Amino acid sequence: MELNNFYEKRKIPLAWLLLTRQPLRILVAIAGISFAGILMFMQLGFRDGLFDASVTVHKLFDADLVLISPRSKSSISMSGFPRRRLVQAMAHKDVMGTTAVNWNFLLWRNPENLSTRSILALGFEPSKPLLIDNDFERKAKTLKNKGRVLFDDLSRDEFGPISSWFNSERIVETEVAGKRVRVSGIVSLGPSFGADGNLITSSETYLELSPGNPKGSIEIGLVRLKKGSDIEKVVRSLNLSLPSDVKVMSLKSFIDFEKNYWKSSTSIGFIFTLGAAMGFIVGCVIVYQILYSDVSDHLPEYATLMAMGYNLRSLLGVVAREGFILSIMGYVPAYISGQFLYALVRSSTKLPVEMSFSRASIIFCLILFMCMGSALAAMKKLADADPAEIF
Amino acid sequence: MKNINNNTLNIASLNHWYGQGEMRRHVLQSISMEISPGEVVLLTGPSGCGKTTLLTLIGALRKVQDGDLKVFGKQLFGASRKTRQNLRKNIGMIFQGHNLLRCLTAEQNVQMGADLLNGFSYKARRAQSREWLRAVGLEDHLSKLPHDLSGGQKQRVAIARALAARPKLLLADEPTSALDSSTGREIVDLLKKLALKQSCSVLMVTHDPRILDVADRLLRMEDGQILPSV
């Protein structure tokens, strides 16, 4: 009923007609707004993608708590701590199990063209859980033989066509840190900022590949708690009971710790946010220009409408609606292009850049804000419309 | 003697100045006049004598500086912007140029006038717009843009637009100046006929001597004063 009433009260859609009867102007406007939108989608997408990529492995850890050395700053500079601390942690009544993980960069030789490249190697006890993956336990069993590794098929192509060779039943052997290894399985982790690729092996093989590693020293300790334990409480009590050469944190704060490193200690966040801000400003300038010249061009017509008895508020409404229409018309192509470009980025860089709902809505709000702000600025020009001047 | 509050327009000792200080010019000097409902009044005079200023004051487009100006019995001296704005809905205006909205068709332009009326459905307002365009003889040009209409046709659309808002007073500022003589004559006749049909008063400023005979009353202005009628 209300809606019907509203429908009957509707008037000539002046804002829509003003825009659409000037196809060139609206095309320029849409192109400009979409460009700004695409720029924001890309910059923010890259930023979030890079931050997400820095924790691809972290997120997969089968753990409630993580032990690291207080000297560790990020995944690319992990320091060791005594493995004994994990055993000591076992003494806590809520701890169910632990896994000691070695984590370091080793040189991988591409079996196809024999070039070498740094790869992130994880060493662990194959009988213990490491990753949350249904099939991982089976793959881990293959590591019990010495000199076997699991290769991450999302690693960059420069490491060689490992997974396609492996899947075609071929025996894939290559060198890691100058020692021969055989690929016994494929996992899917994903590259990050620091690491172009990943491999997983047993602690035994790891120590062989990296003989300089101090005995009994590990980089990461995974701790699993009994069901229903209070994670924060266990973190506090372990931090109190364990010596200060180790730091205990929840898996979530471990992930945040890594993301924070890239956010605060590098200029990545700043660069991409600045890029998005530039897009925003460019968009503002374009929309303002379009709306301002639109108002200026139609000033005598606006004045005529005022002389006819339309009040200033209804005319301001026309400009506001123009801004709103432009924001919708500019956002849709920006969103679609964003999806395409994200797919392109995913396939060529293997970064986990996804169209998230929150980013899509943030950018819609930014575009709306951009258009409405510009409309507001262009409205000032409307005050120049003096109906007494048109006679 | 009629009750003057029923008059469409009452003006008594209206003064108006432009500019400040030394440059101040007295453009309207104690003007007094009135228009009764349904009357067609023509205002002539040399350019620069203040006709247009008077028109904009009556049309509530300017603030009254001094004197009495009542439109439909409403005092405009000291009236707020909102009062003036609301009053304008009851005053139709036809300009020298047609001042149509370029991006709207003839029909939509007329509907911009009809849209000012409250209490009519969209369909009713559209039907009225068509009716007005038919009345001015443009039923075949409903969906043409102003760009595609001739000068006379545009002025007809402007008349239809002004009348579509059902004004009680119609102000026209040299509506024929851009038209040739026969078209000008037609337009003025049409204007008078349609205005009288809904008992709307007309105040028309004109230079055109060929259309003076449509007036019920003729006012001459010179140097900001209305000359005593002959």
Image (tube, grey):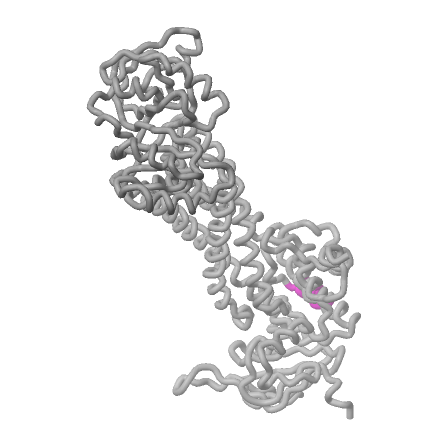
Q: Is residue A363 left or right of residue A179?
A: right
Q: Residue at x 37, y 40 (%)?
A: A254
* Up-down relation of residue B170 to residue A127 (above or below): below
In magenta segment, residue B188: yes
Whether residue A115 is visible to the viewer of this picture, yes or no, is: yes
Identify the magenta region. B181-189
Q: Residue at x 66, y 76 (%)?
A: B87
Whether residue B137 is visible to the viewer of this picture, yes or no, is: no
- The percent position of residue A161, horizontal first and vertical second, equals 37, 14
- The percent position of residue B114, horizontal first and vertical second, equals 71, 63
Q: Which image quadrant for residue A200?
A: top left
Q: Residue at x 45, y 36 (%)?
A: A225
- The percent position of residue A233, horizontal first and vertical second, equals 42, 47
* Up-down relation of residue A303 to residue A43 (above or below): below
Q: Which image quadrant for residue B58?
A: bottom right
In magenta segment, residue B193: no
Q: Quadrant of the N terminus of chain A?
A: bottom right
Q: Nearer the viewer, residue A172 or B16?
A: A172
Instruction: State how many labels appear.
Output: 0
* Up-down relation of residue A313 to residue B50 (above or below): above
Seen as rendered, the residue at the extreme bottom is B1
Q: Nearer the viewer, residue A183 or A362?
A: A183
Q: Is residue A63 left or right of residue B6?
A: left
Q: Quadrant of the C terminus of chain A?
A: bottom right
- The percent position of residue B90, horizontal first and vertical second, equals 69, 73
* Up-down relation of residue A3 to residue A68 (above or below): below
Seen as rendered, the residue at the extreme top is A170
Q: Nearer the viewer, residue A89 or B21?
A: A89
Overall secondary structure of the magenta section:
helix
Seen as rendered, the residue at the extreme right is B197
